[in-house]
Structure formats: structure tokens, C-alpha cells
Image: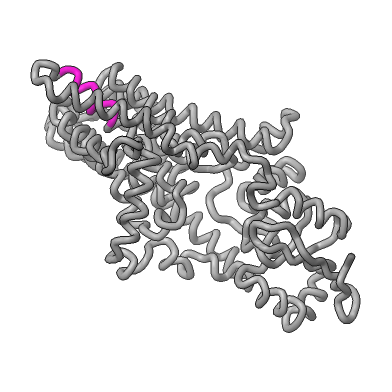
Amino acid sequence: AWTALIFHEQGIDLLHPKIPVFGPPWDVPFEFPLFQALGALVMNAGVEPDVAMRVTGMACFLATMLVLSRLVARIAGEAAALVAMLAFAVCALALLWARTSMIEYFVVAASLTTVYAALRWHESRHWAWWALALGAGVIAMMVKPTTAVMYLPAILALAWTGFRAGRERPLGKPLLYAGALLALIAVPLLFGGLWTVYADKVKAASEFTANQTSAALVTWNFGSIDQRLNPDTWGLILGRVNELVLGGQTYFVPFAIGFAWIPLGFLASLWLKRRLFTIAWLAGAFIGPLVFVNLYYIHDYYLIALTPMAAAVVGIGLVWTMRKWKWILPPLLGAFLVVCWIGNLKTSEHYWVIQFYDTHLGEHHLEAAEYIDQRSAPGDMIVMVGRGWNPATFYYAQRWGLMLEGNEQDQLERALGELLPQLRADGYTRLFDCPPGKQCIAAYDLTTDPPRLLP
């Protein structure tokens, strides 16, 4: 949201996205900031910043749902597409995150578009579909490769079936076909890699962002062997999948019934014409948690990346059970799982209802912003301890500066001690102590010697 607001105020510069919590020179590129640019354009139309970002997030969510429905309809029919749309829209993750200022649904929409357009290219042999798949793939891989890679198995499955088709393969000529397919995979990976190299170079230039480079975040991104061998890791991740994605946690079922959708959906996929493509796409959902285990352990919203596959499993599986009505048991199982899903909406209310809480029940960002605004001028560069790198307080206070991550008391002593000469030389004028989840408790004037505690 803050990068988008800066784009709105200073102009869109995709190569220099600013996150003013790490100090000068302010540039901190993580994902390629296309989502932020879209949000800035909405602000340019006169929409208030928070509303603009939430509208942008919701638009990306709806776009994801639309592409998902067309993809599932293509491989399993309109009935499965309708069920998949409903499952996608009313899982607990969607009920909370669909209307937030997050890039997740933007990159999922791009990833899904890559798969859908590649499929249409195979069917129609029109290069426009290939170009759309390539463009969407580049966007997805540059914005968030940890999500985009989960959709590559579907492209590989298309390649396999295409080559096996012999003279019936798209484009006919094997070398041309191979080159086009290679481009769909290699070009997005190349652009994603180039952006990562550029972003790492920018972050390595500052001592406060050097620990945010890819090399420094290997363990953070991929986790450790011990973490993978720890049952608690998978218990937490699988518990979230059951409750937040597959709708399987209810008051009347004491076990993870939501996981029944997975074998049901894969089994039903065996009856589809494009079974290999479908199974490869659905199986891509396992890549995220297995490869980036720590990210999925720390951040529940990372599961958004696999919600389209989960929704497709539900849609394909449920429709298949209804068509097997002569067997009695499949329809009963499908109906039971639907009842459990409806019950899960109530069970998971503790999760998605937090969007309706007042700010004083959260992290006190608005109160902290008011505290800062009363004790500093709009042009002041400020330092904050106690809130890690969460930019919300700075965003609402409209102050640029440095947030010191780590133990609150240790960082306060560091800022008033060893870092003080450097902070003054860099132009910082105020220091705020704002404990996590509480209102700010102290403010210091760094221009005095020693720093003066402000009332």
C-alpha cells in the first residue's frame, strides 16, 4: 500500500519501488511492483488510498475466480467450474484476504492465465494465446516466483502430451513446437531471475537491507532439514489447509475430513480427457509447502497460491460423485463433505471475522501514527523500535525513516548508543519506542545531546 501511495504521489517507477522503513536510499525491491502500480492508478482516479488498494485486491481476486472457472470448465465442464468458483470464493482464506492490499491474488491470476492460455494455444493453435501465456508467465514469475513455479507442471504436462501426439501436435513441426514450449518456461524464469539479481544488488547496497537479499534468506525461504522432520511443522501447515482451504474443520467431525477432497478430486480426474494435464496442475499445489516449507509455516496467506487447485479438486470431485449416483456411496460422501464445508464457515469464523475488528483490538497502528504525528513534523526522518519491519504505523503517520528489527529494549539501547552518531549524520530527528500490539510509550528528540525524552 505504501509503495503504491508513493507511486501515486511521485509517479510510477517500476525499477525503484520505495519502502521507507529501512532508511535511505529508500529503494527496497522485493516483488516486481505491478500490483502497486495498478493501485496507484486507482488512486490517480481519486480513490482514497486504503480503499484503492482493497479495490485493486478484490479486482485481482475476481479475475482469479473468472480464469479459474474457465480453466475448470475447459477440462471438466461447466458444473465443475461453478462448484470450483464457489469453493474458491467461500474458503476462509478468501473471506479474509480477498479484500486486502496484498499481491497474492494478482500473481495467482497471472499464473492461472499462463496455464489457461497455454491450454487454449494447444487447442486452437492461435499464437495470440501463446503470447498471452508468455506475458502472464513473465508477470507471475517476476512478481512472485514462489507462487508461479507451482503452475509449471501443467505446462510440462502439455508439452508431454503435445509431443506424443506426433503429427497431430500443435504447430506440426517438432522444433518450432519445442522452441515455443521452451520459451513459455524459460523466458519467465529468465525475467524472474534478472529481477531477483537486480533486487539483490539494490538491497546489498545498504547495511539495513543487506540481510534481505536472496542469499541471506535461503533458510527463511526454504526452511531447514530439522524443520522438515518436525511433525509440528506439518501439523500446523496441514491444519491450516484443512480449515482454511478445504473446509474440513467442523464441530461435528473430530478429524481432518477436508483432506478427503484430494483423493476424490484426483480419482475423478482419471475420467477426464485431459487427465495428465489436470493431474499435473493439481499436483503443483504440493510444490509450495514442500519446497518453501518455512514460508508456509510462518505465513498462512501463502496458501492462497494453491487455493485454485484446491477449489478445482472440490469442483471436479463433487461433480464426479453426483454422476456416480448409482453407487449410492459417492453421492453420500460428496453431500457429507459439502455439509462439513458449510459447518466450517462457522468454525473458521475466528479467522476471517478479524477484518471487522476495531483497530484497538489489533496492533494499534492508527493510535501509534497519531502519537508520532503529534511529536514530529511531516518532514522529519524518524526511527522506530518495537514493531519489526511492519510499515503500517509509518504508512498512517506519513513518515519516512528506519525501523530497527529485533528485541525492543536492545534496539532502543543500540539506537541511543552505538547507532546515534550515524543516525544524526543521516538526518534522523526523532526516535519512537512502540511495543508490538501496544501504543507507543516513549519519544526522543535526537537533535539534542543527550537525546531528550519528549512529553
Q: Quadrant of residue 268?
A: top left
Which residue is most to the bottom?
A: 418
- 85 vs 232, nearest the viewer: 232
Residue 15 on image: x %, y %: 61, 51
Residue 147 on image: x %, y %: 40, 47
Is residue 277 shown in magenta?
no
Left or right: residue 105 versus residue 334 is right
Residue found at x 19% / y 27%: 333
Taking the image as drawn, is residue 268 in sight? yes
Q: Where is 220 relative to 166, above or below? A: below
Residue found at x 39% / y 50%: 189
Taking the image as drawn, is residue 281 in sight? no
Which residue is most to the left?
A: 327
The colour style of the image is: one colour
Left or right: residue 108 versus residue 409 is left
Left or right: residue 263 versus residue 447 is left
Q: Where is 283 relative to 289, above or below? A: above
Which stretch did the figure color magenta?
314-323
Please state, as top left, top right, bottom left or bottom right, where the C terminus lies in the image: bottom right
Residue found at x 72% / y 28%: 45
Is residue 316 shown in magenta?
yes
Main structural element of the magenta stretch: helix, strand or loop? helix
Q: Where is 115 relative to 216, above or below? A: above
- 211 vs 12, nearest the viewer: 211
Residue 140 on image: x %, y %: 44, 43
Residue 85 on image: x %, y %: 38, 25
